[in-house]
Amino acid sequence: MFSVIFALSSLALSAPIAGVPPEAVDVPLFSLDRELPAFLVQNHTTATLAVYDGIPLMDVAFQQADWPNVYFKAPEGPWDWSGSLGIAVDVYNPESTPVRVAMRIDNAGADGHHDCVTVNALAVPGEWTACFAPLPSADTGRFWGMRGIPIVGPVGTGKRIDPSRITAFQLFLPRPEQSHRLLLSNFRLVRTSGPAGEAVPFPFIDPFGQYKHADWPGKLHDAQEWPQRIEAEAAELAFEMPEWDAFGGWAAGPQREATGWFRTEQIDGAWWLVTPTGHLFFSTGIDCVGAWSVTFVEGRDGWFEGLPPEDDPRFGPCCQQVANAHSGAEAIDGKGTAFGFYKANLIRKFGESWEERWRETSYARLRSWGFNTIGNWSQGDVLQNSPLPFVVNGGIQNVLRVEGGGGYWAKMTDPYDPAFPEKVEASLRGVLDAFNDNPRCIGYFVDNELAWEAVERGPLASPPDQPCRKAQIAMLTDKYGTLDALNAAWGTAAADWDALRAPENPNAACTADLQEFVRAFALRYFNTINEVIKRHAPHQLYLGCRFSGAPRSVVEAADDVCDVVSFNLYQTRIDCARYTGDNALDAPIIIGEFHFGALDRGMFHTGLVPTASQDVRAQSYIDYVRSVADCPAFVGCHWFQYVDEPTTGRWFDGENYNIGFVTVVDSPYPEMVAAARRVHAEVYRRRFEGVR
């Protein structure tokens, strides 16, 4: 088997690592000559040894599970990897399709978000790929506040970690849609005498916010190019989707009841949105249609060529004072000056009337590209003036958090706080009143990627006065009567109710009780929000909370309450079986975020789902949208986002992903435009004829 596989590839082992100097030295971490490492833990994987041409390999079968991984735990205290650029492993993909693979390096306490660094890569079929996870070095310090840096590329997500105290590392597949097989070899530290990015001369960002030291198709070299680009694009914008009505619905499709508002309907087993005029509607949207993104300039002396003078009144709207709580900006305390290159380029491109001209251009682009929805996080004036359907986002502010629960963005909201209904009302009343009489408003997303995974254990880990903990104790008291009875049922030994915690390995009775409360917790959260929405905007849809992950009981609670259940699904395509059959919900599903990125147009990070080039990125868009349209459970998907993130990182967390349909100089990616037009033009007939 191996000889056949390897005959297909003439590539050698030790695949090259982008950005690592040729003089770098590899230091093997362990040998695969005779046996698998004793400190290897296999989670939803099966690893076996294999040999090709005298070279030892690890043949790993990854199951279809949330995070199947091979996990290597430091056997005797932490590893000291000080002075290393990072860790690498060569990955061979013997399958016919690309496989998204990731590597994580841990300090003590790592939970996937904190005390670890995670990188993503794409294992291309029939090739060796070096999966490389960088460690903190002079590079990342020199280029602070950026998740991807020049030459090196992505430097991982998560907090900075201490390279002298590495407790574990793992190679995993992020929620694969199916099982996969990969061949792994040459686990190694990468060491060098100097930083990989040291050769990058400063300044490295040009006056337009682009990388200075490279060229690529579409790069802007002179402001005089904009008039020609405007004229060339004007002809492109005349393109219109066939068979669309004024709302972007399927005018040539079956006529349904027209209520004057967007609604949902299941037809022959497939879910649809229906336009106010009664036409079938599949929502293709783009998030973050706005010009507000900024990057730090303070504390980055020498980075930027030709920043406008601070007293130039034209560019005053581009400057902000922002907090740096999540930026990794050790050089700045408190607040720092940030600058919006995209907004500055719009001012240069369109002049004094830039806001209106940009808005009208953006509407025309979306319509001609086949997008019929302006997605979440979009600018207020964009929604207020929109000729396209749109969704509105709201977030519950100033909430009490579950003290004992974690979360990537924040600890979980406590819906048992007596003030929670009042806070929901105060947080949502403004957006509901602003759009409740607009028939183009499909509905409202409320909150985003909440820490639902913390609800099972978080309440009982919280202080005794935490409202959700008190509610859970009351539920358990009603069921068991006494603490002794609960201890007997759970197999615990809590001295009093205040000392009760969820055990590390809950038995069946405990698991059932915890899940019962998780569901009650979720129902209280969703019902409170739904009541406010329906009171102020009775004709519009509650679109859920944009799950990034959640227990099934929470998803079912959302299904009971929301008009549409929403997920942010960063995958190569949708596995329909996960959402149909025995897994089907009683409400339709919409995808709030997905994207793909590449490194061939002057950007330093691919985003959450990497691709090899703009061509592959465009084809990935087609494949993803088709997979959603082909699944009867879904009513749409929204791309994240309209414009690339700032080249030097957005101010609050350093993301600098190539995930836009438009560049920082307001030029569309032609590959993405062509892909969108192609798949959007076919989506209605494909869906209607294919899922009936």
Image (cartoon, rainbow, N blue to C red):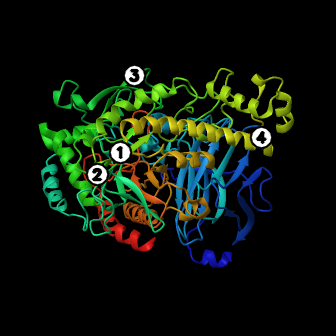
Badge 2 element = loop
Mark 1 to mark 3 CA distance (whole Å): 42 Å
Residue 447 in sight here: no
Residue name at image x 58 percent, y 49 percent: 556
Number of disc labels:
4
Precedes in sequence: disc 2 or disc 3? 2
Q: Nearer the viewer, residue 546 or 78?
A: 546
Label 4: how many Cα within 10 Å (few below 14, some 14–19, many 20+) = some
Looking at the image, do the residues carrying marks 1 and 2 touch, with CB atoms under 8 Å apart? yes
Mark 4 to mark 2 CA distance (whole Å): 49 Å
Which of the 4 image quarters holds residue 90? Answer: bottom right
Observer-side mark, 4 or 3, equals 4
What number is the disc on residue 335?
3
Judging by the rendered image, the residue that carries numbered circle 1 is 539
Judging by the rendered image, the residue that carries numbered circle 2 is 260
Precedes in sequence: disc 1 or disc 4? 4
Give residue 138's position: percent from left, percent from top.
51, 36
Badge 4 element = helix
For residue 657, above or below residue 521: below
Which of the 4 image quarters holds residue 581? Answer: bottom right
What number is the disc on residue 510?
4
Precedes in sequence: disc 1 or disc 2? 2
**Mark 3 belongs to which amino acid?**
Lys
**Mark 2 belongs to which amino acid?**
Gly
Badge 1 element = loop
Label 2: how many Cα within 10 Å (few below 14, some 14–19, many 20+) = some
Mark 1 to mark 4 CA distance (whole Å): 41 Å
For residue 268, above or below residue 246: below
